[in-house]
Amino acid sequence: MSKLGASLLEDLLGLDSGHRGPRIDCGAGHQAEFVSYRDKNLDTVLGPVTLRRAYYHCTNCSHGMVPKDDELGVAGASLSPGLRAMVARAGATVPFAKASELLATLAGVTLTTKRVERSAEADGQALVAIGDAEAAAVLAGQLVPLGPSTPVVKLYVAIDGTGVPTVPADTAGRAGKYPDGRARTREVKLGVLFTQTSLDDDGHPIRDPGSSSCVATLQAAPHFGSLVYTEARRRGSAQAQQVVVLGDGAPWIWNLADTHFGGATQIVDLYHAKEHVHALAALLAPTLGDRHPAWLADRLADLDAGDITALLTAGRELELSDAQREQADKALGYFQTNAKRMRYAHFRELGHFVGSGAVEAGCKAVIGQRLKLSGMRWTVRGAAGIATLRCHQASGRWDEIWQRLDTQTNAA
């Protein structure tokens, strides 16, 4: 049946060879001359087909043109748009070798692992370029996202980063945590945006079902900020009653929040803050002695109540050596710097989430489960492409974004 379908498709496509007369506009103000008809082998969802298309050449520009390829969206490609979409979805979901196997088993389409990899990464990179251009246009005021028709009550922007193993060429010269001082990974910055309109019977906030969307990049924080801001505008941040930024306390996150979300409530993830309390107590353990468990419990209670003043006082009133005091002051500086972002009792009264579980889960599910499997080593471009495909998939925007990609590919 597939072979019959491929034969019918080949006949259908052959009804128009793309001949548009002896000359056509080359797009640069010149005339391209018809040269001949040339064949192109194309893999489709139904199987391989052969296209016979008119080929034109512009002597002024010294390049050829095939109008039919542009119209079908296969210029410079050996896969049809429909098959590319299948390959991108499979390649974004499972390792490329497994994707190749699934395509053969479930769809009867035979593609090498390398072709799956190249096609999926190329389409992911095309989506990266579209997102970058859109973000630049939004920041320049040339594009204004409409946002939802009904203003959201509360929009959360949860931000985190996770390392992805990369090839040596993409970590050369970068400092890392390995014994030799070199890096083996590059950071993927991930933003998860979601809305909240209600509380449960116990007064705990409830994430609106199906409201999460994701953006990711391996580029620097300022560029990531533009992507997050653009997505937030699309999600209705300009009309939202309240915007909340959640993070682990890293300075770059709050710099981003100050730049793009002025007036938003900033909250340090409670569980990261608790880890810092445990680290502080471990540092002070030699001085605390038997009081260590009780001291730790009291400080965790201070943190949970958002009483950072009490936590700082308890840490500074201990008698420590100069070396211990220097270390303790550094650890306490984390709490002092983020005191306003740790008013957890107050945030709970307002019905806010105080944990960044959504983005931490995203780091594991969206990024880790595809890009951090054993033995993987990515190029930055490849990782960015697959991460972007997975973000659109996790955001429930696959059909929308693929239609846009197909349209822009055809236009090009």
Image: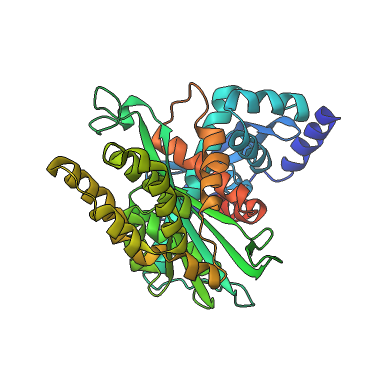
Horizontal and vertical percent for residue 92? 59, 37
Tell me the residue at 61%/32% (across/down).
40
Q: Is residue 127 left or right of residue 182?
A: right
Q: Is residue 119 visible?
A: no
Total labels drawn:
0
Tell me the residue at 73%/35% (across/down).
45
In depth, the one of 237 and 340 nearer the eye is 340
Does 241 appear above or below 217?
below
Tell me the residue at 44%/70% (across/down).
265
In depth, the one of 229 and 250 nearer the eye is 250
Horizontal and vertical percent for residue 324? 19, 42
Does 55 appear above or below 376?
below
Q: Is residue 6 visible?
A: yes
In depth, the one of 26 and 4 nearer the eye is 4
Q: Which residue in the rendered view is the most extreme toward the front?
A: 290
Q: Is residue 34 left or right of residue 280?
A: right
Tell me the residue at 68%/42% (across/down).
82
Q: Is residue 334 left or right of residue 409?
A: left
Horizontal and vertical percent for residue 390? 57, 44
> In which quadrant is the N terminus drawn?
top right
Q: How is the image coloured?
A: rainbow
Horizontal and vertical percent for residue 76? 52, 38
In depth, the one of 204 and 281 nearer the eye is 281
Q: Which residue in the rendered view is the most extreme toward the left?
A: 322
